[in-house]
Image: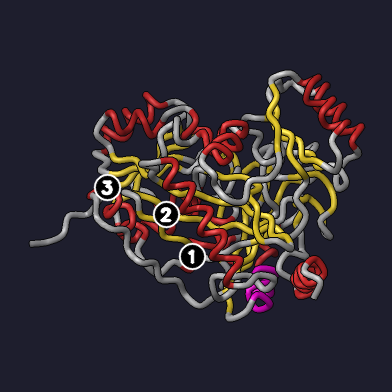
Amino acid sequence: MAETTETVLLVGGGGREHAIARSLAPDCDLYACASNRNPGIAALAAGFETVGERDADAIVDYAESVGADLAVIGPESALEAGVADALGAAGVYAFGPDADAARIETDKAFQRRFMRDNDVPGCPDFETFDDPEAAASFVADYDGDVAVKPVGLTGGKGVRVTGDQVTKAEAADYVRESDYDDWVVEERLVGEEFTVQAFVANGDVVTTPAIQDHKRAYEGDEGPNTGGMGSYSDTGRTLPFMTDDDYEAAVDVIEATVDALDGYTGVLYGQFMLGADGPKVVEFNARFGDPEAMNTLPVLETPFVDVLTAARDGDPLPDLSFADEATVCKYAVPAGYPTDPDAGARIEVDESSAGDALLFYASVDERDDGLYTTTSRSFAVVGRGDSIAAAERQAESALDAAGDGFHVRHDIGTADLVQRRIDHMAELRGE
């Protein structure tokens, strides 16, 4: 008896979702919907509907019209809007948490209180506020540097860190003058950041290799925070500045979080700061990272659709197999991003010039006469190789695809930058 091909709906139109589509498309009938028409996803999908990612009713209608068996929800905005809840109510299994569980990302105050109340390890010292003036006063009076975070979603651009990006006075003014009412203020974590992503369903947790993202806009880790300018992974599960014990400590945090969430389904992403005393949690995300999905999925040898069907059917999640390859992802973003991006500029992307690297479209506006920039990141290239250095060379050679008018952090994955991470951790550990 022939196996039935699954019909899968993908929600979202960014670089993360293009990576998901590329991973799923060979093994299922793929349909997609998003607020922007991503040309990379559209080329892989049997159908693509332009629909708002928070419009749960319209997404359910499209899922039913194509006969979707499963759905994968990419962006956090859709999770916050209850798209997983609505699909589940309509009988479509959604690999993504319901809106309540997604608060582990969408409500930073809930996230910290949840960690404290459930004794999840790795929680920094923090306080939450619903009055900006009280938060600003706490920033000014705190004994040490702090990170100030608006409680809701900010696209990775809302956090300000004293002693790094801003002074305490500037941070207090930022809190007072912003449009946000609710805040988390926590101790500044010093170390090296890394991410571990996990597939979660039916109480099972299977983790993926560690990745380091680069939030700052300019080379040398300078400039404002962005949604992520690029990232890298190594040939194994750790990064060059980490030990196996560091990785296992991060996994322990993720498993404790899943145990306390009780019934969580989807991807759980832990972003950690590795200090001298081990990792602490910077934040959780309730979905794949962007760009981290573009590091993880191209080297995942286990069919992603097998993870989805096991989750839906209540079976144990499969053990994950990964190629022994390092990856380096570099984003091409509009000139002026993130503070004053040159949106609406017509762009030429020569996919053939990417060579052996992978090209993932992110936020582009596909019109009848070509592609145009938006206010967000345009596309990414991902190199793979038997070392970070080899992957970086492949990614860098592919950037001819970017053409003119883009900004790229060329230093991501370079030997100098990776060595600085190693040296920094050695210094923190007194080695």
Badge 3 is on which residue?
312
Estimate how packed mark 2 is, as few (under 14), some (14 to 19) or many (20 or more) residues with alpha carbons within 10 Å.
many
Three-letter residue code for mark 1: Pro
Viewer can see residue 271:
yes
Q: Where in the figure is residue 222, as x and y percent of width and height?
A: 85, 53
Going by the numbered disc 2, the residue's amino acid type is Phe
Query: Quick check: marks 3 and 2 in contact, CB under 8 Å?
Result: no
Q: Is residue 37 above or below residue 201?
A: above
Q: Quadrant of the C terminus?
A: bottom right
Q: Which residue is mark 2?
A: 199
Q: Which is nearer the eye, 227 or 431?
A: 431
Q: Residue at 79% of width from left, 21% of height from top?
A: 134
| Dots 1, 2 in contact, CB < 8 A | no
Secondary structure beneath label 1: helix
Residue identified by numbered label 1: 298
Within the image, what quadrant is residue 260 found in?
top left
How far apart marks 3 and 2 lie (CA) works out to: 13 Å
Q: How many marks?
A: 3
Residue 313 in the image: x percent, y percent?
22, 50
Q: Position of residue 210 (x, y in %)?
A: 57, 64
Which quadrant holds residue 115? top right
**Residue plotted at (60% across, 43% down):** 363
Q: Is residue 103 left or right of residue 405?
A: left
- Going from the N terminus, do you reach mark 3 or mark 2 first? 2
Find the distance from the CA under tag 1 to the CA under tag 2.
Answer: 16 Å
Any magenta on residue 269?
A: no
Mark 1 / mark 2, whichever is N-terminal? 2
Residue depth check, mark 3 versus mark 1: number of the one nearer the observer: 3
Q: Please tell me whether residue 89 is drawn above or below residue 231 in the rendered image.
A: above
User: Given the image, on which type of amino acid does mark 3 rest?
Assistant: Arg
For the record, the magenta segment spans: 388-397
